[in-house]
Image (cartoon, rainbow, N blue to C red):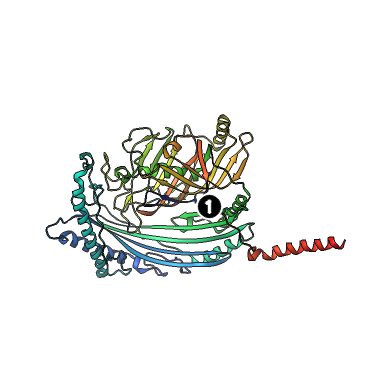
């Protein structure tokens, strides 16, 4: 039975529904005010000062902030995000980056009107006003109540004026909207939350990782055809403070450690090739041993060399197996983003699943749910774990699709038609406005219908013969994907592949190919899936959308589809470096001298 063990694949997923498309201490640092060099500004007393300052300014604004003859705010929320990161990176056996950063930013939300209709109402009217001054979104790093309140005061004033202007404009624009559209409230009513989590330690052994980076990057220099390769190790802690006028107070820590390996080479035809490994964990003990990282680095560059020699594949459609890395990206792009709540009420979105609750939307042997409350999947820690979202709402497991039938959507506090309450998926990076986003997306196959990987491959070969195709495909690794969810243009997605294999229908032999990426339309691609494996794979990464980049995870089985479409990868083709790498120059010169010596001996004879 095949096990899918590469749980560290980097899932960098970007939604094209936008307008487009750190020195470290030698000993571990702690965040609990301990005696071993911990940052005292993260201790419990300092945190209490920050929360008290936020509450004091919030109370003052809620009671007194009002422009004469205009509406006062009915809701105000403050979110402060305190981030600390440490990272070291290197290449060619040496350290090239050593960074230590700290920032504290604030997001202020002010709502004018009421829960039914406010300045965030979904009406396509917006006021833009140029100003020579904008309040700073950064807050003092010191736990100084006066300085913190001063920054929040300016932000609240500016945000209130913008909110009031938008509310009046949208109130005028509402005369053109249908009654049905106006019946959906602007904001959900929720019970206040109170939570103060444990202070998480940020441990970073700089000496250990500097040594590891030098050793690992030096160990792969002898790889044939290697153009460039690097390794970086980072630790990032984010402390989120949240208060609002409904009475919520939430303080929680999030820590993510990562190891990134990346390598590049050029094929003989000039095509740039890339391969990578990513390891994520929430605690340092869950990162792989250095020996494992070194072995993975060697395997990474060996795969890259195989890619250099592999033939480029022409555009193709045919049966394929998508291993968990690829099937997770497929569901993230084709299904997950289209189930985000805000997209159901935005007229500019494609709204693929609007009004389809209770209908069959994917094959009936598959179910999909999102559960941010899952901290682990077996022995793997999940990036998408959190207890409260960025609107202070407790995280919930949401059954999105059950036995192929659509059941619900991912929701923030922006209500959608027929579903007015949040389910704890309002997420954002830094100063961005929260919106419904994925956390831990789980694709589950009916255990009575799931098969072993060997059986999945047998079915692939049978399907290839049935369709009379020259070969099938196995997509083993994928670096990420993108999707267009907007109503303007085509509903489509793309997956950037790393390792794709042609499979001979007679022998089952797998041959590595390069130069292609997966493309398709969401519903068509998903509904061509005919089988799934029993085993699943886990991968962690970050997902980018309108509310910024947030950590996510995906769990998925391998999937067999009767048809996948591959198009050529768009890449420039350039010459490789004219001289050999310096560490290979002596070897090349020795070979050259050897050839010349043999030629000289032949002439003498």
Residue lying furthest right in this view?
Answer: 605
Q: Is residue 16 left or right of residue 261?
A: left
Q: Is residue 166 left or right of residue 364?
A: left
Q: Residue at x 31, y 36 (%)?
A: 355
Q: Quadrant of residue 441?
A: top left
Tell me, yes or no, if residue 442 can be seen here: yes
Q: Which residue is mark 1?
A: 571
In the rendered image, the quadrant that contains the C terminus is bottom right
Relative height, residue 12 to residue 460 (above, below): below
Residue nearest the viewer, comparing 34 with 192: 192
Residue nearest the viewer, comparing 345 with 382: 345
Q: Is residue 121 left or right of residue 8?
A: left
The percent coordinates of residue 45 (x first, y second) are 30, 66
Tell me, yes or no, if residue 115 can be seen here: no
In the rendered image, the quadrant that contains the N terminus is top right
Q: Residue at x 32, y 50 (%)?
A: 435
Decide: few, some or many residues near mark 1? Use Cα within 10 Å; few <14, some 14-19, many ≥20.
few
The percent coordinates of residue 201 (x first, y second) are 40, 62
């Amino acid at each position: 039975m095949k096990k899918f063990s590469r749980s560290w694949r980097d899932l960098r997923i970007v939604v094209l529904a936008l307008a487009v498309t750190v020195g470290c201490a030698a000993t571990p640092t702690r965040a609990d005010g301990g005696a071993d060099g911990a940052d005292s500004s993260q201790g419990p007393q300092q945190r209490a000062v920050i929360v008290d300052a936020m509450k004091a300014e919030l109370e003052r604004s809620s009671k007194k902030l009002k422009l004469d003859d205009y509406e006062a705010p009915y809701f105000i929320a403050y979110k402060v995000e305190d981030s600390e990161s440490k990272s070291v990176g290197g290449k060619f056996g040496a350290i090239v980056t050593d960074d230590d950063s700290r920032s504290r930013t604030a997001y202020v939300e002010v709502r004018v009107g009421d829960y039914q209709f406010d300045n965030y109402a979904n009406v396509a009217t917006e006021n833009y006003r140029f100003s020579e001054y904008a309040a700073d979104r950064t807050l003092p790093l010191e736990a100084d109540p006066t300085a913190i309140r001063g920054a929040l005061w300016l932000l609240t004033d500016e945000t209130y004026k913008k909110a009031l202007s938008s509310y009046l404009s949208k109130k005028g624009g509402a005369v053109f909207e249908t009654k049905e559209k106006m019946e959906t409230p602007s904001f959900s009513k929720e019970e206040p939350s109170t939570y103060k989590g444990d202070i998480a330690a940020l441990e970073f052994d700089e000496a250990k990782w500097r040594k590891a980076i030098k050793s690992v990057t030096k160990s792969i220099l002898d790889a044939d055809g290697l153009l460039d390769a690097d390794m970086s190790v980072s630790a990032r802690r984010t402390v989120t403070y949240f208060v609002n006028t409904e009475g919520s107070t939430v303080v929680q820590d999030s820590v993510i450690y990562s190891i990134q390996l990346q390598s590049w080479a050029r094929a003989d035809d000039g095509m740039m090739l890339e391969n990578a490994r990513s390891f994520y964990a929430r605690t340092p003990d869950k990162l792989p041993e250095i020996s494992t990282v070194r072995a993975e680095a060697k395997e990474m560059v060996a795969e890259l060399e195989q890619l250099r020699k592999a033939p480029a594949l022409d555009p193709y459609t045919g049966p394929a197996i998508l291993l968990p890395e690829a099937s997770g990206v497929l569901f993230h792009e084709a299904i997950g983003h289209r189930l985000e709540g805000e997209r159901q009420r935005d007229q500019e979105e494609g709204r693929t699943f609007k009004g389809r609750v209770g209908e069959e939307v994917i094959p009936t042997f598959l179910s999909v749910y999102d559960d941010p409350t899952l901290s682990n999947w077996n022995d793997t820690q999940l990036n998408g774990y959190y207890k409260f979202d960025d609107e202070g709402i407790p995280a919930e497991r949401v059954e999105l699709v059950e036995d192929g039938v659509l059941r619900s959507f991912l929701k923030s506090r922006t209500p959608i038609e027929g579903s007015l309450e949040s389910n704890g998926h309002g997420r954002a990076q830094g100063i961005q406005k929260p919106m419904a986003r994925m956390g831990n997306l789980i694709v589950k196959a009916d255990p009575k219908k799931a098969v072993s990987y060997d059986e999945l491959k047998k079915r692939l070969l049978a399907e290839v013969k049935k369709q009379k195709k020259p070969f099938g495909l196995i997509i083993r690794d994928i670096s990420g994907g993108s999707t267009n969810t907007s109503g303007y243009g085509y509903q489509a997605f793309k997956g950037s592949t790393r390792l794709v294999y042609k499979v001979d229908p007679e022998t089952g032999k797998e041959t590595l190919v390069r130069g292609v990426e997966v493309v398709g339309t969401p519903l068509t691609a998903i509904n061509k899936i005919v089988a799934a494996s029993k085993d699943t794979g886990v991968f962690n990464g970050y997902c980018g959308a309108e509310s910024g980049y947030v950590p996510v995870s995906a769990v998925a089985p391998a999937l067999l589809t009767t048809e996948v479409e591959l198009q050529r990868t768009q890449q420039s083709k350039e010459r490789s470096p004219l001289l050999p790498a310096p560490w290979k120059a002596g070897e090349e010169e020795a070979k050259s001298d050897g050839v010349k010596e043999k030629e000289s001996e032949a002439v003498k004879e």
